[in-house]
Image (cartoon, grey):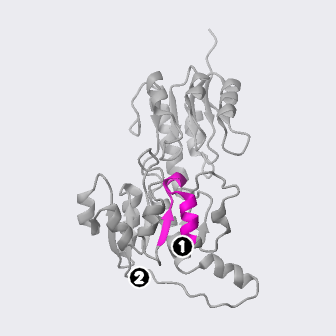
Amino acid sequence: MALVTKNILVTSLSFSKYSDEPKRLLEDHGFKIIWNERKRPLKEDEMVEEISNARPVFAIVVGVDPVTEKVMEAAPELKVIAKHGVGVDNIDLEAARKRGIVVTNAPGSNNQAVADLVWGLILAAAREIPKADRITRQGRWDRLIGCEIWGKTIGIIGTGQIGLAVARRARGFDMRILAYDQAPNMEAAEEIGISYTSLENLLKDSDVVSLHVPLTPETKNLIGERELNMMKKNAILVNTSRGEVVDEEALYRALKERRIKAAALDVFSQEPPHNCPLLELENVVVTPHIGAYTIEANYRMGMAVARSIIQTLKGERPGNEVL
C-alpha cells in the first residue's frame, strides 16, 4: 500500500522565516511543507487553488489569509488549521466546528512584541518623530513642538495579555492607567495599578487611548464619531488590534479637523491600505501590521504552530486549541 504524503500548506509569509527550527520540527515528523509561492496573502479562490494542487492537505498554517467554508470544502482531509498569530477572525470557526477541524493559535507568543511597538507608536506620535526625521533629511532644522507622556493618563481598551503588557510599561512613565474590558482582570489590576472604568469615562479622561480587542461583531467600529468626539483635543489614538475596530472615515475627519491630536496605526480595514485618506495626514503615524514581527515572537509563534500540528495529527489535544 502506498504511503499517503502528509502535506501541510503554509500560507503565512512569516512562518519559520527567521529560524528554521519550526520547519525542521515538522519535517522531522514526516510532514511535507507546501509553501505560499505568491509572496503575499492569498484570496479565497487562491486558497482553494493551492489546496487543490497540494492535496491531500492535512494541516494549514495560516496568516491573514481567509479560511472560509469554501476553502475547507476543498480540503476533505484537513484536520487542523493553525493560526500563525493570535487573532482568528479570518477563520470561519463555525464551518471548522461542523467539520470537526481543530483550530489553534499562538497565544502569548507576541505579547511583548506588540506592546513594544505600541510604545514606539505612542512616542512617535507624541513627539512627531516620523515628521522630524523627514524634515531633517530634507536639510531643514524645524523645532517641532511635541507633548510629554510622563505622568499622563493612558486608557487601555481590552486587558488581555497584550493590553496588560502595555499597562506594565506605562508604569515606567508614571502614568495613571485606566482600562475598559467587559471581563475585568481584577487580580492583574491590583498588581499593576489599573483602574477599570466605563468606555465613556476612559475616552474622556485619557491622553492616550490604546486598542487591544479582538475583531467581533460587537467590536467592529467600536471607536466611531461619537467616541472620537468624547476624546481630549490633545489625545492620541493607537490601534494595533484590527483596523475594523475603528471607523476610519470618522477617524479621518477627527484628525483633519484636529478634534484629536494624532493617531498611530499598525492595522487597517484593508491591508495594504489602498487609497486610504488617513495616509494623507501628517498627524497619523503608520506601520504595515508589524506588531508581531520580531525575531523572538516569530520563533515562539512558529514553534507553537508546529507543536499544535504534531499533537493534533497524533490524535492528541493541543494546548493552544481555539476549538
**Residue under the image location 58 percent in, 52 percent down:** 269
Task: Specify start and end residues of the magenta stretch as a single range.
Answer: 236-255
**Residue under the image location 52 percent in, 76 percent down:** 261
Q: Which residue is mark 1?
A: 262
**Residue under the image location 62 percent in, 52 percent down:** 18
**Residue 139 at x, y = what percent?**
76, 87
Label 2 to label 1, Cα distance in Å? 17 Å
- Disc 2 residue crowd, few under 14, some 14–19, many 20+, Cα 10 Å: few
Q: Which residue is mark 2?
A: 150
Residue 254 is covered by the magenta coloring: yes
**Can residue 211 be seen from the camera position used here?**
yes
**Residue 26 at x, y = what percent?**
56, 35
Residue 117 is covered by the magenta coloring: no
**Of label 2 and label 1, which has the lower sequence position?**
2
- The one of 5 and 268 positioned closer to us in this rendering: 268
Q: Amino acid at mark 2?
A: Trp
Q: Amino acid at mark 1?
A: Ala
Q: Can you say whether 262 is above or below 313 in the image? A: below
Residue 6: name its quadrant.
top right
**Can residue 294 be seen from the camera position used here?**
no
Q: Can you say whether 312 is above or below 114 in the image? A: above
- The one of 108 and 180 positioned closer to us in this rendering: 180
**Tag 2's secondary structure?**
loop
**Tag 1's secondary structure?**
strand
